[in-house]
Image (cartoon, grey):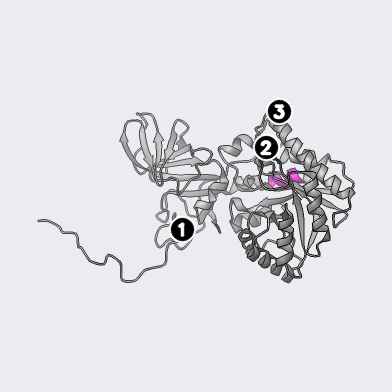
Amino acid sequence: MSIRFPLQADGLLDAPQSAPRFKSVAGTGNTPLAQGTAVFSSDEVFSPLMIMKQSALENNLRQLAAFCRENGVLLAAHGKTSMSPAVLRRAITDGGAWGLGAATPAHVRALRQFGIRNVFLANELVDPAGIRWIGQWQQQHPDHGFLCYVDSLQGVKLLEQHLGDTQISVLLEMSVSGGRTGCRSLPQALDIAHAVHASPALKLVGVAGYEGALGAGRDEAGIQRVKDYCQMMIDTAALLAEKQLFSDDHIILSAGGGAWFDVVTACFTAANLPLPMTPLIRSGAYMAHDSGLYARIAPFAQPGACHHFDAALEIWGRVLSRPEPGLAFVDFGRRDVPFDQDLPNPLWIRNADGSEPRAATHLRISDVNDQHAYLLLPEDEPLQPGDWVGCGISHPCTAFDKWRYLPLVDDDYCVTDSLETAF
């Protein structure tokens, strides 16, 4: 007897349903995993899933908070890494951050909706709609702190045109030839500072930059490049202070992303300026850290560091197939994991029911497609379809954006909280 597949002219269901929000949750996918859920043995979990370990997150928040206290610097933790309110609010409540950093007006809006009082748009603000929205928010919430960059006379003009009656505080951004945004010379910086000083819409409160765009390595030459860049910002601040172009008698120097905040802090705290100065660093990747890029280049990963970060993110998937000796496929890929710096790094194996965790350091992922990871393994490795493979990731800034939701888990991989993202 043959079985015929029903063919219909219209292959749609009668009524569309709401799209599932959480791809790693079974059922309708619209409700986060309940607290206490054991992720490897629960029927409520779809594979693959990315998790964040609570103990690592808490450690990382404590470690950078201690560094900032010890060195007298403020922290505007960059929110773009996770865009998760549950993570970012912890950076302030538990991690002592002054506020959060943003890269776009949409980020600023999201952070305000997360309940963040102080926001630093570490970028130029030139979009008219974005300027108007931020100006209106500041007018309605004058006690909410806001900072952004300027690096051109046209940028000053755009802010003046669209801010209305609102006044905002800006930092002059400096950079180097071939770098990212920012003024390239002291004469240019002086012209822009004069324009800001003359503007009723703007207050010049500091000088800023981003040393990560230098592409420097952690060798003697790379460290010197970062130091020279910091000195350029210090020299700019000194010149503007001598010309009395700052709006306050206390100024900000800001730089220091995830890779160089130690060198930036040392340079800024040693600076001798005509006005009192507060260094403000802007690391964001530290909350998650990683098992690749930042595990190599982060300040606390260097020999002699007094603090340490732990990798908080892991991607877990199930073995799909072992089609030939020495090769298996796992059910995560470019839709699920970062691959711009390094491929995922196998850490652990578990049986299909979550039992018998064991090291996976003898395995290697050689490539990822959209939904497949190529896993190289010894021919005698007993791993089989359905088993779990857990990997560390590299570059958290391109990890969170692939997930609307991550479970926060304890060290036994039981859910403690829900982390939703707003990319």
Quadrant where the C terminus is found in the figure: bottom right
- First along the sequence among labels 3 and 2: 3
Does the image show residue 98? Answer: no
Q: Which mark is residue 22?
A: 1
| CA distance for labels 2 and 1 | 34 Å
Q: Residues within 10 Å of mark 1 (few under 14, many from 20)?
A: many
Give the amino acid type for the residue marked by disc 3 in the picture. Answer: Glu
In this rendering, the label closer to the viewer, 1 or 3: 3
- First along the sequence among labels 2 and 1: 1
Q: Residue at x 67, y 29 (%)?
A: 219
| CA distance for labels 3 and 2 | 17 Å
- First along the sequence among labels 1 and 3: 1
Q: Is residue 65 magenta?
A: yes
Give the amino acid type for the residue marked by disc 1 in the picture. Answer: Phe
Quadrant where the N terminus is found in the figure: bottom left
> Relative to 305, does residue 332 appear above or below in the rendering?
below
Does the image show residue 207? Answer: yes
- Predominant SS along the magenta part: helix
Give the amino acid type for the residue marked by disc 2 in the picture. Answer: Phe
Residue holding disc 3: 220
Residue 140 found in image quarter: bottom right
Task: Judge left or right: residue 186 versus residue 411.
Answer: right
Q: Residues within 10 Å of mark 3 (few under 14, many from 20)?
A: few
Task: Judge left or right: residue 359 versus residue 195.
Answer: left
> Do tag 2 and tag 1 residues touch (Cβ < 8 Å)?
no
Residue holding disc 2: 300
Q: Is residue 245 magenta?
A: no
Q: Position of residue 185 (x, y in %)?
A: 76, 43
> Relative to 279, does residue 322 appear above or below in the rendering?
above
Q: Residue at x 31, y 71 (%)?
A: 14
Segment colored magenta: 62-68
| CA distance for labels 1 and 3 | 46 Å
